[in-house]
């Protein structure tokens, strides 16, 4: 049987993870390497890893609603989200606060939505965020 790291995680972590229904992802530095490229007209571009898109689609298939959230007014992030069929919020000032409307709109879609305990924000500075 192939090795699976999942069996080595504490059972409490499995219980917590199984309740997640909303995953909010930062874009720059989380779904990209953080570099920004500009053409001569000032248009921004960035590179997205194709397997991250697969992972986001797999989350959807398993009942987790992924949302892309970025502080930048990023048309490339908006396009990436549209290509994947994923809700995307651009030019967001407070990323954590922007999760609330997603949680509220998603709550009506899923009867299993008990609270913020089912939301997982994912960005490169999570350790420094107010999310605890």
Image: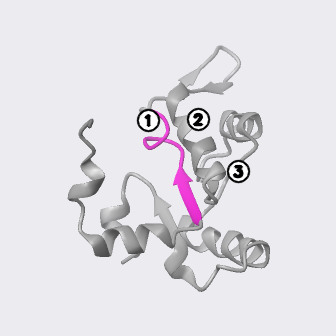
> How many marks overall?
3
Quadrant including the N terminus: top left
Q: Dots 1 and 3: beta carbons under 8 Å? A: no
- The one nearer the camera, 95 or 41, is 95
Q: Position of residue 120 (x, y in %)?
A: 49, 66
| Residues shaded magenta | 22-32
x and y percentages locating residue 94 in the rendered image: 57, 67
Q: Residue at x 27, y 44 (%)?
A: 4
Residue beneath label 2, please?
53
Label 3 environment density (alpha carbons within 10 Å; few <14, some 14–19, many ≥20) = many
Identify the secondary structure beneath mark 2. Answer: helix
Left or right, 105 with reference to 71: right
* Labels 2 and 3: the sequence-earlier one: 2
Which of label 2 and label 1 is nearer to you? 2
Q: How much space separates mark 2 and mark 1, taking CA atoms?
A: 17 Å
Point out which mark residue 88 bears.
3
Residue located beneath label 1 in the image: 34
Sequence order check: which comes first, mark 1 or mark 3?
Answer: 1
| Residue at x-position 72% and y-position 80% | 111
Mark 1–mark 3 distance (CA, rounded to whole Å) = 18 Å
Q: Secondary structure at mark 1?
A: loop
The answer to whether residue 117 is visible is yes
């Amino acid at each position: 049987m192939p090795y699976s790291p999942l069996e080595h995680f504490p059972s409490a972590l499995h219980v917590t993870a199984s309740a997640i229904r909303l995953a909010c992802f930062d874009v720059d530095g989380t779904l990209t390497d953080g570099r920004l490229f500009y053409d001569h007209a000032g248009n921004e571009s960035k590179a997205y890893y194709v397997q991250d898109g697969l992972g986001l689609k797999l989350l959807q298939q398993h009942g987790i609603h992924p949302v892309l959230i970025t502080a930048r007014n990023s048309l490339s992030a908006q396009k990436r989200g549209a290509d994947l069929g994923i809700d995307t919020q651009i030019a967001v000032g407070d990323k954590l606060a922007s999760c609330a409307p997603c949680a509220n709109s998603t709550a009506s879609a899923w009867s299993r939505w008990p609270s913020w305990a089912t939301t997982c924000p994912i960005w490169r500075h999570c350790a420094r965020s107010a999310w605890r």
